[in-house]
Image (tube, helix red, strand yellow):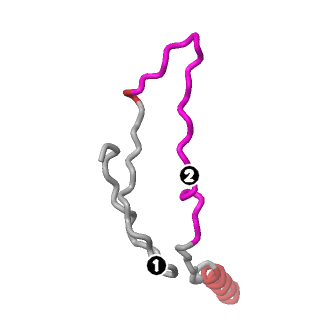
């Protein structure tokens, strides 16, 4: 029975150590979410009432930040977000 336990322990160590490798994050690469664009508004058909614009959720704009130098490490926190009106 101790041979089976040793094999099981060795397999579990190998399995978990395979997942723990270091991953290089290149923050200069453009991510999919950074390519997002605002979509067009939903239009109600002519025979229906228009949608209530007061029930839309305004998305705030991110505060402008100076460009980061190439090769700089990833930021720990996202940029601050201001209100849509500012």
Establish if 17 lies above or below 77. Answer: below
Q: In this view, does 57 lie to the left or right of 14?
A: left
Main secondary structure found in the magenta portion: loop
Above-or-below relation of 45 to 25: above
Q: Position of residue 79 (x, y in %)?
A: 37, 63
Looking at the picture, tell me which residue is in the foreground, 50 or 75. 50
Is 51 on the left-hand or right-hand side of 29?
left
Residue closer to the observer: 20 or 34: 34
Q: Which residue is disc 1 drawn over?
A: 69
Question: Which of these two is toward me, 74 or 69?
Answer: 69
Number of marks drawn: 2
Residue positioned 56% across, 36% down in the render: 40
- In this rendering, position of residue 53 left or right of residue 86: right
Please say whether residue 37 is one of the residues in the magenta stretch.
yes
Indicate which label's residue lies in the foreground, 2 or 1.
1
Give residue 67's position: percent from left, percent from top: 43, 71
Among the 4 quarters of the image, the one containing residue 9: bottom right
Q: Could you say which disc has been placed on residue 32 in the image? A: none
Write the residue at 38% across / 47% down: 60
Which residue in the structure is indicated by mark 2? Answer: 36
Q: Is mark 1 on a helix, strand or loop?
A: loop
Magenta segment boundaries in residue numbering: 29-53
Q: Where is residue 63 in the image (x, y as percent from the top left)?
A: 35, 58
Q: Tell me the quarter of the picture where residue 62 sits.
A: bottom left
The answer to whether mark 2 and mark 1 are in CB contact below 8 A is: no
Residue 77 sits inside the magenta stretch: no
Q: Earlier in the sequence, mark 2 or mark 1?
A: 2
Could you tell me residue 47's position as x and y percent? 58, 10
């Amino acid at each position: 029975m101790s041979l089976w336990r040793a094999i099981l322990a060795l397999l579990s160590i190998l399995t978990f150590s395979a997942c723990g490798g270091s991953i290089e994050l290149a923050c200069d690469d453009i991510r999919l979410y950074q390519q997002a664009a605002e979509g067009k508004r939903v239009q109600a058909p002519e025979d229906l009432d228009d949608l209530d614009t007061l029930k839309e959720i305004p998305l705030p704009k991110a505060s402008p930040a100076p460009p980061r130098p190439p090769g700089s490490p990833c930021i720990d926190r996202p940029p601050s977000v201001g209100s849509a009106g500012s």
